Image (cartoon, rainbow, N blue to C red):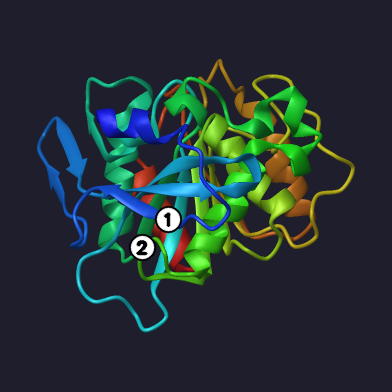
Amino acid sequence: MRTVLALVVVTACAPSARVREVSGQASASSCTAASDSVTCTHRTFQLPVAAVGQSRVVHVGLPGGDPPASGWPCVVLFQGSLFSAERTWSATRADAFGAFWQTATVAALLDAGFAVVTPEVRLFGTTAWDTNLPQWSARWSEAPDRHLLVALLDAVGAGELGPLDPRRMYAGGLSSGGYMTSRMALSYPGRFRALAIHSASWATCGGPLCVLPDALPADHPPTLFLHGERDAVVPIGTMRVYEERLRGQGVDVDVVTAPDKGHEWLEAAAGAMPSFFRAR
């Protein structure tokens, strides 16, 4: 993790402060892959969140070539707990939780013409997203991560993170990031065209504790679920309940599972996620 990131996360900002690039390259992202590693270049921004008087860090990668007139379609990837979103952009096969396949998925999304945006959890991954925290889960309007999303969506719409299309946004993530992905359906109706929920379930669930509301959003986006069948952290049954409820409501759903995998990114994600998003 670069030192500059640790310095910018707690910087106080005035309401009129603007998004500021703090590191990276102005050119489009490029990825390099070897047999045991994948790395993608990206840009890092300091995003003012005026409602809480602080800024948050957001990493952005853009595809190669010229963007469409409306901007690149944009995938917001929410990192799981324990790791900084900076880790999304470089991984080896030895890294925990299938991180190699997470970065391979980023590379595949970029190759497919999607920009990738990875916002940081507070304290660079040492906490979970607020959707999993009891003090905020049921009081989302007051959650710091709610204010982050408002600032992020505003920055995308204003073109402050690059040529991104605010009308073609998608979201995905693993574990706590997967629950945060579900939160997009609950709290940001109409903003995301499709979701990819990996090793997680409904927005307010956590691990084996999962009770869905009586009714899910009527406009819930099409959803791709990815899950290891041996997942002991988030049992696959919690995802199945969510899946079945969405199918019952007529929501477009696809599921990818791996019988021999646990709580980790699946190799199949690198193909399944770009394909699912491109079709929607």
Query: Which residue is at 28% across, 40% downward?
Result: 89
* Residue located beneath label 2 in the image: 114
Please give left or right for residue 74 compared with residue 218 in the image. Answer: left
Q: Residues within 10 Å of mark 2 (few under 14, many from 20)?
A: many
What's the residue type where badge 2 is placed? Phe
Q: What is the CA distance from the residue labelled 2 to the residue labelled 1?
A: 21 Å
Residue mark closest to the camera, 2 vs 1: 1
Spot the residue most to the right.
214
Label 1 sits on a secondary structure element that is loop
Q: Amino acid at mark 1?
A: Val
| Residue 266 can be seen in this image | no
Q: Residue at x 43, y 27 (%)?
A: 124
Name the quadrant of the N terminus. top left
Residue 276 image offset from top left, x and y in percent: 47, 59
From the viewer's perspective, tell me whether residue 41 is left or right of residue 136. left
Q: Nearer the viewer, residue 25 or 10?
A: 10
The image quadrant that residue 237 belongs to is: top right
Residue that sits furthest to the bottom in the current view: 69
Where does the image place residue 63, in percent across and percent down from the top left? Answer: 26, 63
Residue located 51% across and 30% down the image = 122
Q: Which residue is mark 1?
A: 19
Q: Is residue 132 above or below residue 56?
A: above
Pointer 2 and pointer 1: residues touching (CB < 8 Å)? no
